[in-house]
Amino acid sequence: MTKLVYFAWVRERIGKAEEEISLPADVVTVGDLLSHLKTLGEEYETALQVPEAIRVAINMEHADHDEPIAGAREIGLFPPMTGG
């Protein structure tokens, strides 16, 4: 099981703050994860409709979309940061 944590409008659109899911064997990178999540329902599709805008942290460290997720204890998904 992999723990996913959602932040800001990603959380609002998916409708939950976190969840634990089993990932298929072919989900090996952050990009694969985002593509897989979009298949889980309309709320995921809406939240992840522009996957390149989603920022990801693996075990609380920022990760690129081509980064492997093997061994991740927690994966956070959040929108781009703004502010000043």
Image: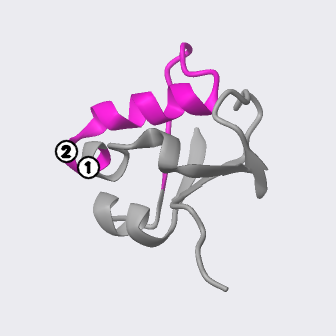
Q: Position of residue 51 (x, y in %)?
A: 45, 40
Quarter of the image with the N terminus in it:
top right
Task: Determine the residue positioned at 55% across, 29% down.
Answer: 31
- Residue 23 is situated, as x and y percent measured from the top left of the image, at 51, 28
> What secondary structure is found at the residue carrying circle 1?
helix
Label 2 sits on a secondary structure element that is: helix
The answer to the question of whether label 2 and label 1 lie on touching residues, with beta carbons closer than 8 A, is yes
* Tag 1: amino acid: Thr
- The amino acid at mark 2 is Glu
As drawn, 69 above or below 18: above
* 79 relative to 74, above or below: below
State the residue at coordinates (39%, 68%). 9
Residue at the spot 47% in from the left edge and 36% down from the top edge: 34
Q: Quadrant of the C terminus?
A: bottom right
Q: Nearer the viewer, residue 81 or 22?
A: 81
| Residue 17 appears in the picture as rendered | yes
The quadrant holding residue 36 is: top left
Residue 48, quarter of picture: top left
| Residue 43 colored in magenta in the image | yes
* Mark 1 residue crowding within 10 angstroms, few (<14) / some (14–19) / many (20+): few
Is disc 2 surrounded by few (<14), some (14 to 19) or many (20+) residues within 10 Å?
few
* Magenta extent: 19-44
Q: Which residue is under mark 2?
A: 42
- Viewer-nearest of discs 2 and 1: 1
